[in-house]
Amino acid sequence: RKEVEQDPGPFNVPEGATVAFNCTYSNSASQSFFWYRQDCRKEPKLLMSVYSSGNEDGRFTAQLNRASQYISLLIRDSKLSDSATYLCVVNNGYGQNFVFGPGTRLSVLP
Amino acid sequence: NAGVTQTPKFQVLKTGQSMTLQCAQDMNHNSMYWYRQDPGMGLRLIYYSASEGTTDKGEVPNGYNVSRLNKREFSLRLESAAPSQTSVYFCASSDKTGALIPLHFGNGTRLTVT
């Protein structure tokens, strides 16, 4: 089993839709969690860190469930510009162990 | 503010050739990393440097060497390139280790080994 797994996708949704991505991690010692966005042929960019109590940034909401070792990202009112691959990243807080999921691709259609 | 700068952006090598990928950051970050990204594999850590003067192996170090030249610069060297090293390489940096400290990435180097 991979250490970080994500919905395989791709997700094709119309503009204005709400879409949710799921991510599970296997290392119960994991301490920090992030969502990154990666556009085609570009570098990953931090979308948001995920706090224990969950957090919201505009149209984006991230949730963490430590008991189930599960992270989610909700995007409301999808825009064409949200089309990208979304990467779940987990860090166990020790050393440099950032572990990346394979990513979920989102296409927002007009 | 340039952030993390990688050179070159593209490179084609023949099997057995060598090359060095350069990375520099201007954010005064302590930690620097080299990742490779292959389709369906996610990003995998090659080497990292927690601070100036230290380097450690990541998940896939074979065939690579690194140098942390100073706090700003972290280079990745392929001594004898192989087709299996065809990939996109990303350099990244972070302020320090610990919780909720994210990575900042360079633009990437697309390497093809024929």
Image: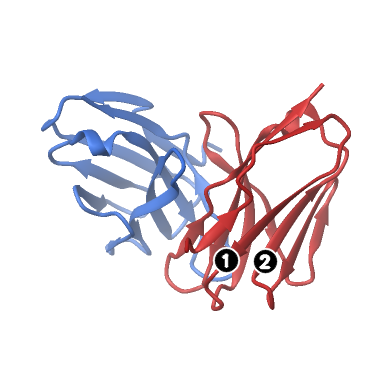
Q: Amino acid at mark 1?
A: Tyr
Q: Which quadrant of the rendered structure holds the C terminus of chain A? A: top right
Q: Classify 10 Å Cα crowding around label 1: few (below 14), some (14-19), many (20 and above).
A: many
Asked if marks 1 and 2 fall on the same chain, the answer is: yes
Could you tell me residue B64's position as x and y percent? 21, 48
Query: At 83% from the left edge and 29% from the top edge, which residue is drawn?
Result: A14
**How many residues crowd around disc 2 within 10 Å: few (fewer than 14), some, or many (20 or more)?**
some
Q: Label 2 lies in what chain?
A: A
Residues marked 1 and 2 touching at CB (< 8 Å) = yes
Disc 1/disc 2 C-alpha distance (Å): 6 Å
On the image, the x and y values in percent for residue B36 come to: 38, 44
Is A66 on the left or on the right of A61, as rendered? left
Please tell me the colour of chain B. blue
Q: Which residue is mark 2?
A: A70
Residue A90 placement: quadrant: bottom right
Please identify which colour was used for chain A in the image.
red
Q: Residue drawn 56% across and 38% down? A: B1
The residue at which mark 1 appears reads as: A25
Q: Secondary structure at mark 2?
A: strand
Q: Secondary structure at mark 1?
A: strand
Q: Position of residue B97 (x, y in %)?
A: 49, 68
For marks 1 and 2 on the same chain, the one whose residue lies earlier in the sequence: 1
Disc sitting over residue B62 in the figure: none
Instruction: Identify residue type, mark 2.
Output: Tyr
